[in-house]
Image (cartoon, rainbow, N blue to C red):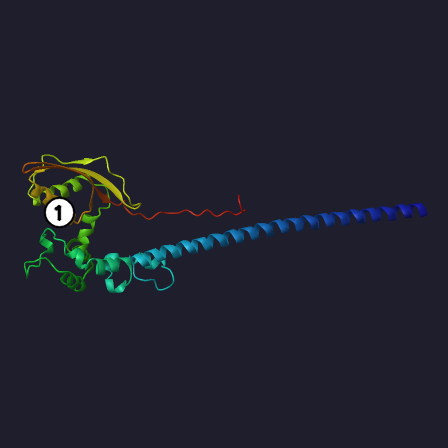
Amino acid sequence: MTREVAVSKRLKITKAQQNMLLAVLAAAIVLGAALSVSINLIKQISFNKDVIVEKDKAIASYSSLIKDVGVCRKPAGAVYTDDELLRCNPDAIELSEIPGTLRANILQELAADPALNSVLKEDETRCINSSTGKNYTYEELQEIYSNVNTDEELAAASDMIKACSALRVIPDALPSFRNEEALLSSVNKIFDISGWQPEALMPSDAYTQSDYSDLQAIGVNLSIESDSSVAMQVLSNMERSIREFNITNVDMEWSENQMNLGARASAYYVDPTVIVETTKTISAGGKK
C-alpha cells in the first residue's frame, strides 16, 4: 500500500513538472512573439517617421521654389496646401502680390533696365502706342499691366512687357539654345548695316570651346574683301552688337585700296535651365 502511494505521488509530481514546463514554454513563445511584434512595430514606426520627415522636406523645398520664383501667391502657412496649388493661376497674379520674387524682379527691374532699353528694336504693331505713334515706354507698359480687369487681359499685358520691354534683348544677347541660323542672320544684318554684302556665310566647327563653364560657343567664319573703311565698319558694328562676338583670329591683307580680312569668331549661348528631379531612397533596415 505504501509503495502504491509513493508511486502515485511520483506520477503526480512528474505531471506537475510537465505542466509547468509546458506553461513556461508557452510563456516563452508568447514573450518571443510579443518581442518580435514589438521590434517589427518599432522598425515600422521608425521607417514611417523617416518617410514623413523626408516627405515634409520635399514639400518644404517644393513650396520654397514656387514661392521664390513667384508662380503663386505666398501660402497662408509654411507650405502650400493642395487647395492653394489648385487655385494658383500665375496669369492672374499682380506683381504687387509677389514682391521680391524672381518673377517680380525680372518684370520690374530687369525689364526697366535703361542699358537694355537703349538697344534699338524692330517696331512691332503691338509695341506701338497709337496715341504717340512711338514704341511704348516701360512706364506705359506698367500702366497697362496695372489697369487690367480680367485674367486674359493680365496675361496679354504680361506678354506685352516681355515682347516690348528690355526683356526682349536678353534672348538676342544670350540665346538659350544653339541656333546657327539665327547667329548667321545676326552676322548678315551686321554686314548689311555696314554696307557689305557677303557672297556666303557659314558656321565654323572650330573655336567652339568656351572659356566659361556655364556658356556654350558657336564658331563663325568671316570673310570681307572691300576697302578698309567698310571692313573697319563691320568690326565696329560687331563690337557694338548686343550679341557677344569673341574674335579669336584675324588675318588682314592690303592691296592698294582693297582690304582682305578673314576672321574667326565665337558667339555664345546657354543651355536651357531645367529643374532636376531628385529621388530619395529610405531604407527600413539600415544598409539593406
- Count of all numbered marks drawn on residues in the image: 1
Could you say which quadrant of the image residue 128 lies in? bottom left
Could you say which quadrant of the image residue 157 lies in? bottom left
In this rendering, position of residue 128 left or right of residue 114:
left
* Residue 114, position as x, y percentages in the image: 17, 59
* Residue 282, position as x, y percentages in the image: 48, 48
* Residue 223 at least partly seen: no
Q: Residue furthest right?
A: 1
Q: Amino acid at mark 1?
A: Ser
| Front-lying residue, 34 or 175 | 175
Q: Which residue is identified by label 1?
A: 236
Q: Residue at x 9, y 53 (%)?
A: 125
* Residue 106, position as x, y percentages in the image: 24, 57
* Residue 35 at least partly seen: yes
Q: Residue at x 32, y 58 (%)?
A: 68
* Residue 87, position as x, y percentages in the image: 29, 58
| Front-lying residue, 210 or 66 | 210
